[in-house]
Amino acid sequence: MLRYIVNRLLIVVPLLLALTVLLFVYVHAVPGDPIAGMLGPNGTPELIAQIRTDRGLDRPLLEQYWSWLSGLVAGDLGVSLISGQDITPIVIDRIPATLQLTFAGLFFVILIGFPAGYLAGKYKGGWLDRILSPAALIGLSMPSFWVGTLLILLFGVQLRWFPTGGYVAFEDNSWQSLRLTFMPALVLGITLSPFLARMVRASTAELTREPFVVQARTRGLLPGTISRRYLMRNAILPVVVIIGMQLGTLIGGQVIVEQLFNWPGVGRLLIEGAVRRDYLLVQSLIFVIAVIYIMINLLTEVVHAWLDPRVRL
Amino acid sequence: MSTVPRIARIGMPGLRVRDLPTGGVQAITFHAIVHHRRALLGALLTAIVLLIGVVGSFWTPYDPMTFDTGPAFTPPELAHPMGTDVYGRDILSRVMAGAQVSLLVSAGAVLGSLIFGTIIGLLAGYLGGFVDVVLTRIVDIMLAIPGLVLALGLVTLLRPSAFSVSVALIAVYTWQFARIVRSSVVAVRHRPYVEAAKGLGSSGLSIVFRDIFPTVLPVLIVQVATAFAWGILDEAAIGFLGLGVQPPSPSWGSLLIEGRQYLYDAPWLPVGAGAVVMVAVLGVNLLGDGLRDIVDPRSGGAHL
């Protein structure tokens, strides 16, 4: 098990290295002068030149890349193009909020997606499936900001059950923190669970025809026992893999949800940077988000290997 | 139409033995779509949305940019079926005018990524070796960045406009296309008929386009539908975040920012604009699902 984890970690290193190269190329391949664009009409040539020198943007590209990379290795994300502040402390400040929402969102994705997919697959073609399958397709087509807006209007404005946005750290006020997490996490759950549900449905439907399930039935085992012992256990396995596949969409969706609910996470920081066209900040944030994404993905792989020893080989 | 041998179907108990169509591009006929409920519903919804886009480009009930077509914040009523916004502009007109922008952005994104992705996928899959290793690694890495996050980053660098959103989405979607095309090419690269074409002295280009590309086509068609749905959603999301088409020009994305600003005064604005986006995406998704069933009959069997 430990060897498996170390192996996976070793694969991540070249991946991250290549990621920095590609990000850097992407950012610098874009035509036009982002600084002039950022300053707009206030951008006198002198001011532009001064910012260039201050942020080290007049140096050769290779040197710029090297200083960015060596900074990243040391945990330094560089400085903001606009304010010149160090990015690292700002990001560290925001990571707890982001992770809290990511895991709460995952919780709802599984809470909604797994039972729906399992039941629809187990009774494929039945009345429940006939309701759930179209519902999943509709869910797949709903923009997250729209679901969020509807929830805010319903729970926040009409019923006044939940606050419409904001964030309180869990350590400061756990109850309020959970109340604030509920709606944004539910939005992630509603918009992302249909994908999980569809995959679980397909695999469960397949399972009901597997020889070992048919055999259990002919042995006269109670339907409940068959479900618990054979269906449910095997249906849970792909969930971990699918969660890994879906993570990118979850994180993308989270950017929108953070913006909608005033959630001070990394996603919102990315939008703030993007709106002000602070490309140094955006470049480092995309890297941070990709790292979070790769790490959680790795975590799901490890969990999968732990659940299903065959994967470890 | 050729069929799957009956023998392949005997293993499934309780199923009536019936010849399955083999699928493929030839299976996409008018007949097949009309007789597939999801594909038909999807095709109809997509057609309606496209029609709205076309009509909206030359006629709308009111001018989408004119102020005071009615009192500000009129809730939906007969004269303004979707209400009016803060300046008294007719929202239905703006949704109709915005449709063409949103659909064009999405179509551009799909077309661009289709072209680039297919080229990369064909190169990697057909040439193999070193080229394949390098290209596959690049694809893996690009897919390791959450798509919307990368798109947002790219939009930052470009001037916020419909064109930039298209470019950013191309840069994000291309890799998915490349991966799909590559795996289909690898699957057929050593089939006898490809080897035969090689033996007959066909040029590489001719083998790629006449022998290999047609086998990739069914998967690509489904992927195009899927990507088109993403495109509509992502354009709206980027617009919603204020980084896409800028107000006052209408697009579904830019309508949503205005909707968000006046969420409490005029909830019908975001609800209505969002609902239109949902219907459009649902239509394309249904069509994509249906087409998948038609080109690959053994994949589906979902209900609606």
Image (cartoon, coloured by chain):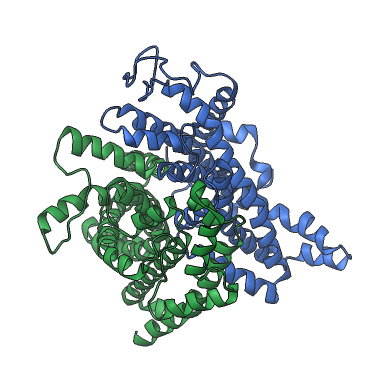
Chain colours: A green, B blue
Q: Position of residue A29 (x, y in %)?
A: 61, 62
Q: Position of residue B186 (x, y in %)?
A: 66, 66
Q: Residue furthest top?
A: B79
| Number of marks drawn | 0
Name the quarter where the N terminus of chain A is drawn: bottom left
Please tell me which residue is depicted at 50% across the width and 25% down the height of the picture. B96
- Is residue B209 something one can see in this rendering? yes
- Is residue A313 something one can see in this rendering? no
Residue B262's quadrant in the figure? top left
Q: In this view, does A301 lie to the left or right of B173?
A: left
In the depicted structure, whether residue A277 falls above or below residue B39: below
The residue closer to the viewer here, A67 or B223, is A67
In the depicted structure, whether residue A16 falls above or below residue A260: below
Q: Position of residue B98 (x, y in %)?
A: 51, 31
Residue A239's quadrant in the figure? bottom left
Q: In this view, does A267 lie to the left or right of A23?
A: left
The residue closer to the viewer here, A193 or B246, is B246
In the depicted structure, whether residue A247 falls above or below residue B262: below
Name the quarter where the C terminus of chain A is drawn: bottom left
Please tell me which residue is depicted at 45% across the width and 58% down the height of the picture. A278
Q: Position of residue A201 (x, y in %)?
A: 37, 52
Please tell me which residue is depicted at 65% across the width and 42% down the height of the picture. B27
Please tell me which residue is depicted at 49% across the width and 49% down the height of the picture. A42
Q: Is residue B124 left or right of residue A65?
A: right
